[in-house]
Image (cartoon, rainbow, N blue to C red):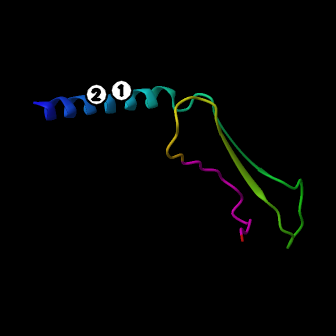
């Protein structure tokens, strides 16, 4: 009987956690992408910085961030 309680309890916790993340995962979550140099010329090296800030109590075990840049940029 204990095993049934454990399974039901685990399922309830999982469903509650899933609903909390659906509702609150993007609140107070900020992402920015920028170059450290204002301008560079050909064959110079620059730096691309990506900053993600999570200002909420929910931890994010995994986060996927996508951004687009010009296809003529070469990343080394």
Farthest left residue in view? 1
Question: Marks 2 and 1, Cα distance to the nearest angstrom?
Answer: 6 Å
| 65 and 61: which is toward the camera | 61
Query: Is 58 colored magenta in this rendering?
Result: no
Pinpoint residue 60: horizontal percent, then vertical percent: 52, 40
Q: Do the residues labelled 2 and 1 touch (CB within 8 Å)?
A: yes
Quadrant housing residue 27: top right
Helix, strand or loop status at disc 1: helix
Q: In this view, does 48 lie to the left or right of 14?
A: right
Pinpoint residue 49: horizontal percent, then vertical percent: 74, 53
Query: Is 65 colored magenta in this rendering?
Result: yes
Q: Quadrant of the N terminus?
A: top left
Say which residue appears at 39% left-offset and 30% top-offset: 17
Residue hosting label 1: 16
Q: Which disc is residue 12 wearing?
A: 2
Residue range in magenta is: 64-75
């Amino acid at each position: 009987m204990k095993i049934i309680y454990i399974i039901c309890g685990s399922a309830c916790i999982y469903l509650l956690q899933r609903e909390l993340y659906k509702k609150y995962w993007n609140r107070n979550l900020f992402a920015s992408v920028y170059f450290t140099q204002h301008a560079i010329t050909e064959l110079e090296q620059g730096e691309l910085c990506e900053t993600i800030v999570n200002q909420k109590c929910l931890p994010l075990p995994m986060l996927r961030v996508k951004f687009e840049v010009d296809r003529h940029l070469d990343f080394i």
